[in-house]
Image (cartoon, rainbow, N blue to C red):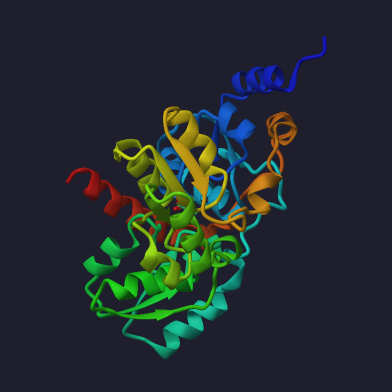
Amino acid sequence: VDLSVDEEIAALRRRRRAVIVAHNYQPAPVQDIADYVGDSFELSALASQTDAEVIVFCGVHFMAEAAALLAPGRTVVLPDLRAGCPLADTVSPEDVRALRARHPRAAVVAYVNTSAAVKAEADLCVTSANALRVIEALAEDEVIFVPDANLGNFVARHTRKRLITWNGTCRAHNAVRVDDVRTARREHPDAPIVVHPEVPPAVAERADAVLGTGGMLQYVRTHEARRFVIGTEAGILHRMRRENPDKEFHLLSASLWCPTMKYTDLAGVARALRDLEPRIEVPPEVATRARRALERMLELGRRREGG
Ligand code: CIZ
């Protein structure tokens, strides 16, 4: 019998005792077959709790690595190995060691968008959702922050701590322009403009809210406006429209499209379930240190949930 790709995924998911997780930026058909859709923090927390034997991670490489770190003994597969993160690739473990040598009193904070090898050099990880709060709570007055310069500068503008930032950026977010904000205000004067902290500072300053994707989803769900302009990767519009069928969503800029997030497709998910490849593994000597940095992030996140 010829099964449709959806039926094949459903059958293999049961046989493999697998969970399929998808990032908020994934293509619509992938979000629709996933068991969970979320941001890095939510998907990491889920990986650390699931009893599934296989985690199919529909996202980019560093996210699958984080799942492998937090779910030891499980098989983590990334449907397409080309799905990297150019932002994460801007910084290496050697770069972090050199920064630490130059600023020995500073805490080293790695944005979750980093390789496991870079996380292993950090004291702790943060996401865009908790970066400011976590950095504020550190004992150190000096903080090395890698790799996103725009997120680092956003935090720096809201804290008295001295931030030493790396000069990485996300190509999609960093290409948003002040002119895009002006055009959106003209075309949708009643719509709040919500942007991600990876956009340039001049854009963030002109927006109505600066939030990670989890925060954005909550913002549009609870805000009384009927129309929103969204300044983050286009994939999230699918989830916003599905969860808020009576509201309207517009993308702030056509640049907000991440090519590597789009490598995942249903055929790739089926293949990953069938072959249990490409498998994502982290060498044990890196894993122990990287896991500690991620667990500190999860621990601080849980404290927030507990109030
Ligand atoms: O933290 C994440 O998942 C990323 C990459 C973006 C966001 O704000 O959710």
* Image vertical order of residue 246 relative to residue 69, above or below: above
Is 304 in front, or is 99? 304
The number of numbered badges drawn on the structure is 0
**In this rendering, position of residue 81 left or right of residue 71:** right
Is 220 in front, or is 6? 220
Can residue 203 be seen here?
A: yes
Q: Quadrant of residue 235?
A: top right
Query: Furthest residue to the bottom?
Result: 102
Can residue 72 be seen here?
A: no
Which quadrant, please, contains the N terminus? top right
Query: Furthest residue to the top?
Result: 1
Query: Furthest residue to the right?
Result: 1
| x and y, in percent, of residue 13 in the image | 61, 23
* Image vertical order of residue 14 relative to residue 166, above or below: above
| x and y, in percent, of residue 154 in the image | 37, 70
* Image vertical order of residue 286 relative to residue 238, above or below: below
Is 205 in front, or is 31? 205
Residue sitting at x 43%, y 72%? 202
| x and y, in percent, of residue 135 in the image | 29, 68
Q: Quadrant of residue 78?
A: top right
Residue sitting at x 27%, y 46%? 302
Is 218 in front, or is 6? 218
**In this rendering, position of residue 190 left or right of residue 288:** left
Residue sitting at x 63%, y 19%? 10
